[in-house]
Amino acid sequence: MKENNNWRKKQNSISVILVLILILGIFTFIFLNYSKEETIFGKTYINNIYVGGLNEKEAIALLKEKLEGEFVRKNIILSFKEYRKEITLKDIDGNYDYEKAVKKSLKNGKDKNQFKNMINIFMMRNKRYDYNLEFVFNNKKLNEISEKIISDISKKEKNADIKISNGNIEIIKEEIGIKLSKKDIKRQVIKKINNKKYSISLPITYIKPEITQEILEEINGVISNFSTSFSSGNINRVKNIEIATRAIDGKLLLPGEELSFNKTTGERSKSNGYFLANVILNGEYVKDYGGGVCQVSTTLYNAALLSGIEITERAPHSIPASYVPKGRDATVAYDYLDLKIKNTYDYPIYIEGNPYKNSIEFKIYGNNQNIKKK
């Protein structure tokens, strides 16, 4: 009986040793197969292609064999509404970054301690690990294609416009701008291709103009007008009046905007088209370029007064003007005297200037049913 027990103990010991040898053998086999070269541990897939147990060169070769030919021939369609730009990945040297993904998978489970590596190999043998290939391309070539697309599609925004003829108001609708950038196109291309999508909507930004049809439709009629007369005999003076009046004609002031007479009409000089005519200087009449322009500023000043908008700068003549009541004139001198008017209404105003044979008239258009000020 005692001998039987001893024999059973010996058998158990032998069994344990054999199991340990078997386990060690399995570990050694796995380790030798996976670690004789730098190989990928575990059930590892890159883009759903099994690469477990392969070294770097083998994994890259397998991935290229399975993916590269079909991938580089893929067509990419870049579109916006009816616009379509079709290119191939080959046009931008597009491909997968095989090396990066393989190197990343090779690091999984690796340790400087060889024993830990053996444990990792065993523990990872039935667990799935997935990696995705990243898209790479020639940045210069994609930029060149993007520049062409931007040139084809981009559109500068355009403000709504107002035209007034014989008292009839016409509003021309604004145009929405279209903007896109090389940076945004590149980001969209990378994002979509990494998600295996090859039909790409271009990343458009719409630019709304500052002045819209809705804003200009607030203008519905005349809120003031004023005219002054002059002799048509002084041709140079008449020409100067016409030049300055036409410079003011058509000006639009949004709520809070200010108009400077000098900035709008420009320096009174020969190069700007003005002629020599009488001006008042130090209380005397002398010849200078732009003579007669003060009658334009005075006429505008009176129209502005009657409209109720704010006069932010104005100076009287040293000699009272004959074409308006005393105290109702506004002199200008390009370097130091200006007439400035500011739109204090909640709606835009439009200034119409009309030079006639022997008179000038300014009409200020606004909302004649709403005179609420800003």
Image (tube, rainbow, N blue to C red):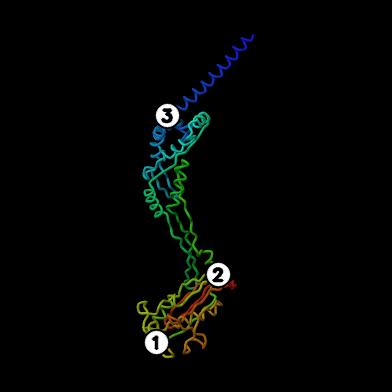
- Residue type beneath disc 1: Asn
Dot placed on the residue nearer the N-terminal end, 2 or 1: 1
**Could you tell me residue 85's position as x and y percent?**
40, 48
Mark 3 crowd level (few <14, some 14–19, many ≥20, 10 Å Cα): few
Which secondary structure, mark 2?
Answer: loop
Can you tell which quarter of the image residue 232 is in? bottom left
Find residue 41 and report its horizontal and vertical position in percent: 48, 32
Residue at 47%, 26% (x, y): give it.
30
Q: Front-most of 199 and 242?
A: 199
User: In x, y percent, where is residue 365?
Assistant: 52, 73
Dot 2 amino acid type: Tyr
Q: Which residue is mark 3?
A: 36
Q: Name the element at disc 1.
A: strand
Q: Which marked residue is nearer to the observer: mark 1 or mark 3?
A: 3
Residue, disc 1? 278
Residue identified by numbered label 2: 347
Q: With 118 as the anchor, is 64 left or right in this view?
A: left
Q: Which residue is most to the left?
A: 271
Q: Is residue 85 above or below residue 162?
A: above
- Whether tag 3 and tag 2 are in contact, CB under 8 A, the answer is no
What amino acid is at disc 3? Lys
Disc sitting over residue 52 in the figure? none
Q: Give the Cα separation between the discs numbered 1 and 3.
A: 104 Å
Which structural element holds mark 3?
Answer: loop
- Pick whichever of labels 3 and 2 is earlier in the sequence: 3
Residue nearest the viewer, comparing 102 with 50: 102
Alpha carbon separation for disc pair 2 and 1: 39 Å
Q: Position of residue 142 (x, y in %)?
A: 39, 48
The answer to which image quadrant residue 334 occupies is bottom left
Name the image quarter holding residue 53. top left
Quadrant in which the C terminus appears: bottom right
